[in-house]
């Protein structure tokens, strides 16, 4: 099988990570792969905030958890860290003024998750980036980073070394996934 297709098919959402930092060179490769995602009319509406700083990572986790708790929800398995211990958080935002911004940002997320898998790392899309950056704290964080309110959070791509027991078998694909027109 083609290596790229194998990386796509073998990718899993990882929800348990080793307490081990990810080498910055690997993070750079993942982020670069994200920047090559297709975008509507090549407007490149997304921006990636690459967080490897533990304090900022923990702040983002807290902000995400506050949204979960505010809705009366629980994270998967009641985990108190919505980022499941992953040391890297790659936040994708996109310019709201671009008509394809949600799709553009989603493609960046997918590229980064496939890239992480190809490098032997685990990843998972964690929601609530939109809500995080709609809070006053989130808007202030964007201003502190030199980003304007014209951006909307698309997703949080968490990355790290998967714990050995975190990888689950591939779920079967549903039978009616493809409708052929020949």
Image (cartoon, rainbow, N blue to C red):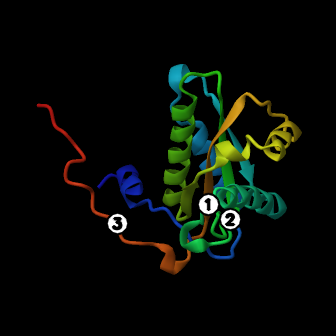
Q: Determine whether the residue tagged by mark 2 lies in a helix, strand or loop.
A: loop
- Please give left or right for residue 136 compared with residue 180 in the image: right
Rendered residue at 57%/37% (across/down): 105
Residue positioned most to the right: 144
Say above or below: 46 vs 50: above
Residue positioned most to the left: 182
Residue 96: percent from left, percent from top? 65, 27
Residue 97: percent from left, percent from top? 65, 21
Bin the neighbour count of mark 2 within 10 Å (Cα to Cα): few under 14, some 14-19, many 20 and up: some
Q: Determine whether the residue tagged by mark 3 lies in a helix, strand or loop.
A: loop
Circles 1 and 2: CB distance less than 8 Å? yes
Query: Label 2 belongs to which residue?
Result: 22
Rendered residue at 33%/52% (across/down): 2
Which quadrant does the C terminus fall into?
top left
Disc nearer the start of the sequence (1/3): 1
* Count of residue discs: 3
Q: How far apart are marks 1 and 2 (CA)?
A: 8 Å
Disc nearer the start of the sequence (3/2): 2
Quadrant of the image occupied by residue 42: top right
Which quadrant does the N terminus fall into?
bottom left
Bin the neighbour count of mark 1 within 10 Å (Cα to Cα): few under 14, some 14-19, many 20 and up: many
Rendered residue at 41%/56% (across/down): 7
For residue 159, the mark is: 1
For residue 170, the mark is: 3
- 69 or 80, which lies in front? 69
Rendered residue at 60%/66% (across/down): 74
Q: How far apart are marks 1 and 3 (CA)?
A: 19 Å
Bin the neighbour count of mark 3 within 10 Å (Cα to Cα): few under 14, some 14-19, many 20 and up: few
Q: Distance between the residues labelled 3 and 2?
A: 25 Å
- Please give left or right for residue 149 compared with residue 39 in the image: right
Residue 145: percent from left, percent from top? 84, 40
Residue positioned most to the front: 72
């Amino acid at each position: 099988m083609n290596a790229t297709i194998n990386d796509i098919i073998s990718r899993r959402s990882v929800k348990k990570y080793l307490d081990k930092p990810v080498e910055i060179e690997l993070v750079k490769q993942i982020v670069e792969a994200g920047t090559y995602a297709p975008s509507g009319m090549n407007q490149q509406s997304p921006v990636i905030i690459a967080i490897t700083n533990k304090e900022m990572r923990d702040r983002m986790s807290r902000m995400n958890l506050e949204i979960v708790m505010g809705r009366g929800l629980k994270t998967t398995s009641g985990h108190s860290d919505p980022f499941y211990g992953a040391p890297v958080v790659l936040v994708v935002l996109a310019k709201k003024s671009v008509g394809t911004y949600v799709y553009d940002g989603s493609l960046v997320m997918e590229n980064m998750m496939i890239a992480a898998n190809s490098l032997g790392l685990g990843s998972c899309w964690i929601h609530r980036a939109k809500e995080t950056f709609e809070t006053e704290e989130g808007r202030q964080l964007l201003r502190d980073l030199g980003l304007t309110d014209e951006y909307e959070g698309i997703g949080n791509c968490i990355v790290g070394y998967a714990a050995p027991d975190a990888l689950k078998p591939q779920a079967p694909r549903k039978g009616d996934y493809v409708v052929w027109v020949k």
